[in-house]
Image (tube, rainbow, N blue to C red):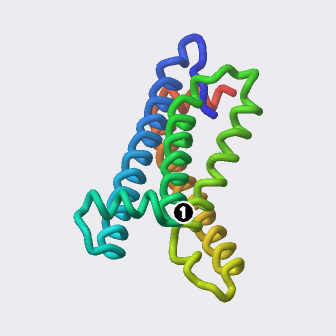
Amino acid sequence: MIRPVAGHDRPAAGAVTRRWQQVAWISLAVAFAGSLAELVTRSLAARDAGVIDAVMQSLGHDEWGFWWLTRMVLLVLLGIGLAISPWWNARWAPFNNACLWIISSMLPLALVLGSHAMDDEIGRITTVTMSYLHLGALALLFGGAIGIAIAKNAISNPRALQMLRSR
């Protein structure tokens, strides 16, 4: 976790923290918009009804609707947790990190259980497991790439680079 520091290094730490918070909120918005588009598309494809009726029937009567709602709850919890995590108290860091990792590891499961992996009757456990591992690997890959880009941008700041060299 990145935490604000005291003293003359506070502006550099604050800038990095704000960038991470922006990434968290933007990621939450993109994931929410994509999930809403998926909900509307899947509902209209499955039912011959109006948009609102099809969406309400999908959410209320399908197993997929339950997993979609679960995914939305996890997305909201993860987005809020990632956005406020830099400001948590340092002595609670192990607990906060554990909570964020648990929520982060549950999110791909909710995505997989609401996807085509659940449609297969034969080999469902294998399909769900492999889809979960695939989504987890992609999340680590893209999350790491974003983290490296933000860190590189922060280190290009001469003051932040001097601070790192002095330690």
Judge by depth and name the residue closer to the eye, 86 or 166: 86
Give left or right: position of 84 versus 23: right
Give left or right: position of 58 versus 100: left
Judge by depth and name the residue closer to the eye, 89 or 103: 103
Judge by depth and name the residue closer to the eye, 74 or 121: 121
Q: Which residue is mark 1?
A: 111
Residue at the (69%, 47%) spot, across then down = 102
Judge by depth and name the residue closer to the eye, 144 or 41: 41
Q: In the orientation shown, which residue stands out farthest toward the left?
A: 50
Residue at the (39%, 44%) spot, across then down = 26
Q: Quadrant of residue 23?
A: top left
Q: Residue 122 appears at what percent x and percent y?
A: 66, 88
Residue at the (62%, 50%) spot, across then down = 104
Q: Residue 18 appears at what percent x and percent y?
A: 45, 30
- Numbered-mark total: 1
Query: What kind of residue is marked 1?
Result: Leu
Q: Residue 119 appears at what percent x and percent y?
A: 55, 80
Q: Quadrant of the N terminus?
A: top right
Q: Quadrant of residue 123?
A: bottom right
Crowding at mark 1 (Cα within 10 Å: few <14, some 14-19, many 20+)? many
